[in-house]
């Protein structure tokens, strides 16, 4: 494997460990919207700075997909898509991630994995679900019209748990992280067919020796199993050249040129040689790239967001005790980074049935450009 080592930092395991402070850690953190007990997951922003936030199908469930208008939730594109009955091609089942591409098309990943593949302990998933339900929905934000629904032909739906999505508008491809298969799913937007790459590779598998711990308490379920996620956060640079990825329970951030992901003739053994190690960044969750090539990474262990510049410098953007599992991100043309805080480590399934979430759930923003 060819390695491009930019920089390495120590994995920060808790707030108590501390780190060198600088002026970037004092950036003003602003509340964009509050949601009471509705848990925000996906966040993305259009070129006109329209803010979109999605919610998994967990109680209390109001909407799966919203636009934030003057701090309030507006169901997107309408109320019909929020229904929990009828044709599943025409309503949301369990929205996992959202992404606005450079053409201002909104992509909504509706992902409800089979019971055995849910890394987040989703109470809405039952033991009877032998296959997951997956679709990718495309809306045109110029008129909020539905363009297409993709159903992932060729995907192993008994093992998959599609998590994040990014769209390559040059190649008409969508790239998705799949923790269930520990691989990268490439969806052909012209044909609707999909391929799964790098399955169970050392670059996409979690490191089981890394156990997340908060205030001295390990994040484990009622059976004592630690939280662990294979490939999860992903980012695509705005020029569609570089695809960044990593598991949550892993230290290194990786990248690969998208031309290799698009090449159907390359086998996994050949793709591995195209992967570059960017940096040791510690445990992280969501990733996103901005217009100048910075890649942002969220970290719940020390309540922070950092970025890696195109020159390879790691910068602290913000650190705040309110950043409880900072998760999905979007960058607006207004220069703000928008992001959700999912508070995953405070959910009942990781605390012996006790709900420790700090209400209300909120989405924040911080000036970065």
Image (spheres, rainbow, N blue to C red):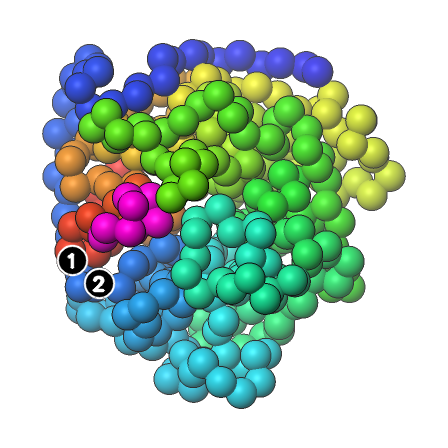
Residue at 68% across, 14% down? 2
Task: Give yes or no for contact between labels 2 and 1 (Cβ–Cβ under 8 Å).
Answer: yes
Name the residue: 26% across, 37% down: 368
Residue 186 is a magenta residue: no
Residue 309 at x, y = what percent? 40, 25
Mark identifier at residue 328 = none
> 156 or 211: nearer the eye?
211
For the C terminus, the quadrant is top left
- Describe the element under mark 1 as helix, strand or loop: loop
- Which image quadrant for residue 242? top right
Residue under the point 41% across and 36% down: 224
**How many other residues sit within 10 Å of disc 2, few (<14), some (14-19) or many (≥20)?**
some
Residue at image position (59%, 58%) is 114
Against 248, is 178 above or below? Answer: below
Task: Count all numbered tags in the image, as a single digit.
Answer: 2
SS label for mark 2:
loop
Q: Position of residue 154 (x, y in %)?
A: 77, 58
Residue 249 in view: yes
**Residue 105, how many percent across, how many down?**
51, 64
Circle 1 residues within 10 Å: few <14, some 14–19, many ≥20 = few
**Which residue matches tag 2?**
37
The label shown at residue 360 is: 1
Residues drawn in magenta:
348-355
Q: Is residue 134 left or right of residue 40?
A: right
Q: 334 or 111, which lies in front?
A: 111
Residue 127, horizontal then vertical, whole percent: 55, 62
Quarter occupied by residue 36? bottom left
Q: Main secondary structure of the magenta part?
A: loop
Residues at marks 2 and 1, CA–CA distance in whole angstroms: 6 Å
From this viewpoint, is residue 143 visible?
A: no
């Amino acid at each position: 494997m060819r390695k491009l080592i930019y920089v390495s930092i120590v994995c920060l395991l808790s707030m108590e460990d501390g780190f060198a402070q600088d002026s970037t850690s004092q950036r003003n953190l602003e509340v964009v919207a509050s949601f009471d007990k509705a848990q925000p997951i996906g966040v993305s922003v259009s070129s006109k700075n329209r803010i979109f936030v999605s919610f998994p199908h967990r109680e209390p469930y109001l909407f799966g997909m919203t636009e934030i208008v003057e701090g309030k939730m507006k169901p997107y594109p309408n109320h019909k898509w929020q229904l929990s009955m009828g044709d599943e091609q025409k309503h949301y089942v369990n929205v996992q991630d959202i992404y606005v591409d450079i053409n201002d098309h909104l992509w909504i990943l509706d992902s409800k994995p089979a019971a055995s593949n849910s890394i987040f302990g989703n109470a809405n998933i039952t033991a009877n679900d032998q296959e997951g339900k997956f679709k990718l929905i495309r809306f045109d934000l110029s008129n909020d019209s539905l363009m297409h629904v993709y159903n992932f032909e060729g995907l192993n739906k008994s093992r998959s748990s599609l998590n994040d999505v990014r769209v390559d508008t040059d190649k008409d491809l969508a790239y998705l992280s799949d923790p269930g298969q520990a691989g990268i799913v490439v969806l052909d937007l012209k044909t609707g067919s999909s391929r799964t790459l790098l399955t169970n590779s050392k670059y996409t598998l979690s490191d089981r020796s890394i156990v997340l711990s908060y205030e001295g308490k390990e994040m484990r379920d009622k059976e004592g199993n630690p939280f662990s996620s294979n490939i999860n956060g992903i980012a695509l640079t705005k020029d569609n050249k570089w695809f960044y990825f990593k598991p949550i329970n892993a230290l290194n951030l990786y990248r690969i040129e998208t031309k290799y992901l698009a090449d159907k003739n390359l086998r996994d053994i050949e793709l591995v040689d195209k992967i570059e190690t960017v940096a040791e960044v510690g445990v992280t969750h969501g990733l996103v790239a901005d217009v100048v090539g910075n890649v942002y990474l969220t970290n719940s262990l020390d309540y922070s967001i950092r970025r890696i510049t195109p020159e390879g410098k790691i910068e602290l953007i913000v650190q705040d005790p309110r950043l409880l599992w900072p998760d999905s991100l979007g960058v607006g043309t207004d220069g703000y980074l928008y992001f959700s805080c999912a508070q995953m480590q405070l959910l009942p399934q990781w605390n012996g049935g006790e709900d420790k979430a700090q209400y209300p759930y909120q989405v924040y923003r911080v000036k970065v450009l």
